[in-house]
Amino acid sequence: MKSFVVWLAVCWTLTAGQTQSTMDQRVLYTGFRLLSVGPLTCNAQVIAMELFLKSHKNSKQVVLSIDSRLSVNMTSWLTVAPDAFDDVSSFLSRHEIPFEVVNDDIQRTMDENARLNAEALNAKTRAIVDHTAYIRYNDQILWMQERATAAGTIAMAFSIGTSSEGRSIYAVGINNENANLPAVWLHGNANARDWLSSATALYIIDQILTGISDDSVFLRTNFRFFIVPNLNPDGYEYTWDVDRVWTKTLSLNANQVNCSVPKGVFAVRNFDANFGGAGCDPNPCSATYCGSSAFSEPETASVRDLMASITGTAAMFISLDSFSQQWLVPFGCQLSKPTDFDELNRVALKAVDAVYQVNQLNFSAGTPVELSGVSTGGGFDWSKLTQGFRYAYSVHTRPASAGLGGFDVPPDQIIPSGREVFAGLATACREIQLI
């Protein structure tokens, strides 16, 4: 069955007093549609779309996909609640904007992907699988501990901090005792619903520690790694138990008392890189609310604090997200580019070429400003601006668009994604110049 996206910023059916672990309180998206809209043909249509979406912002019945950019000659993706479909279709027809219903029931696709994942887990004797299924956070920790122990002195699994709900945020360190080796940082799943990003990070850890390819040997011989597969364990678990489309952490904030779900900050925008600017929604109820201040979340603060303790050469920083098949280069937080942009982009282009060689998928290289618009508060910008990482990237996994699955893809995508990003990482590490 072809998988389609569920990019929603909606969780209005829960209340603050609900328990997050019971199935009867899950947020369901039955009858929600995914629409392919456009391409828009003129600025008048762009302006009309912007005004229309603004009018629906508070109701959250019509939401623009995260990988969409309202621009002439571009296609956008909308998720539409059942009660809003007639209004949306009437608006689009009135403004002569073409559209197609790509998925007529988003919940059905979610359920199918969940079924496929359960089957993959049941095919194994244990919940910890060989990258053939998504696994719960505690199983991710156990997997990391077992892999690190099996690798011997080269690796260790350790906590870098504690989440708002008290979960340990785990990392795997590789060659960390050798400060003479250049350091590579990688984290995934800062966005709670980006399951493929943490699954891909686990695959990368496995390849570095146990792989026999030239790339695996090269990486574990010449670099040290700090890899945090899941930076947002609270939000991740919430997506399993309550709301598959949840984006934020689960911190409690005084200014969110009037929100339908009074919790959380979008950790992806919580770093100190022009914090609070474009791409950060100041509305505390928004799915992309960036918080009251940079590093307000214990999850992002744990990255900052561990980063301060790393000595030696800071080589490369990668934040791993899904989706849109992009290898993003600084800066996203400002219009100007770093002075060494040409070198950063050269390495990015080498990486995306290596990605293509794996499964013939095209990844785009460039700045967020060029590809999707200004977005402040990103970790990779922060690492470049203040932490001394010469090479910094935000890598967005497969698929290419919301229409091809978005963040909710079946588990058979894990290994292909892992192979792609691993190839890009290995090539990037071979190309960097730490002079």
Image (cartoon, rainbow, N blue to C red):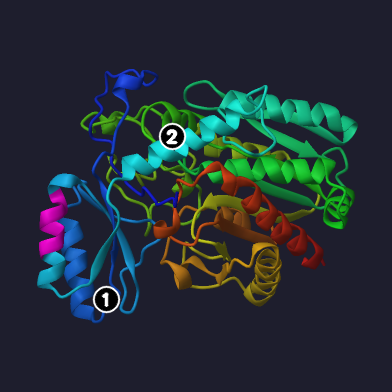
**In the image, which disc is placed on residue 364?**
none
Label 1 SS: loop
Based on the displayed image, in which of its 4 quarters is residue 238 positioned? top left
Q: Is residue 59 visible?
A: no
Q: Is residue 41 left or right of residue 330?
A: left
As displayed, is residue 336 above or below residue 256?
below
Question: Is residue 371 shown to the viewer in this render?
Answer: yes
x and y, in percent, of residue 375 in the image: 43, 59
Residue 6 lies, in percent from the top left, at: 36, 47
The residue closer to the viewer here, 37 or 163, is: 37
* Left or right: 109 in relation to 299: left
Residue count near mark 2 (Cα–Cα under 10 Å), binned few <14, some 14–19, many ≥20: many
Q: x and y percent of residue 209 in the render? A: 82, 41
Identity of the residue drawn at 41% across and 67% down: 373
**Quadrant of res 137:** top right
Which residue bears the numbered disc 2? 249
Q: Is residue 83 left or right of residue 177?
A: left
Residue sitting at x 66%, y 53%:
317
Front in this rendered view, residue 357 or 11: 357
158 up-or-down from 220: above or below: above
Q: Which mark is residue 40?
A: 1
Given the image, on which type of amino acid does mark 1 rest?
Answer: Leu
Instruction: Tell me which label, 2 or 1, sits earlier in the chain.
Output: 1
Residue situated in front as seen by the camera: 89 or 320: 89
Is residue 305 within the magenta segment? no
Task: Magenta stretch: give its range.
Answer: 84-90
Cα separation, mark 2 vs mark 1, equals 35 Å
Give yes or no for residue 86 being in the magenta stretch.
yes
Label 2's element?
loop
Residue at point 30%, 31% (across, down): 27
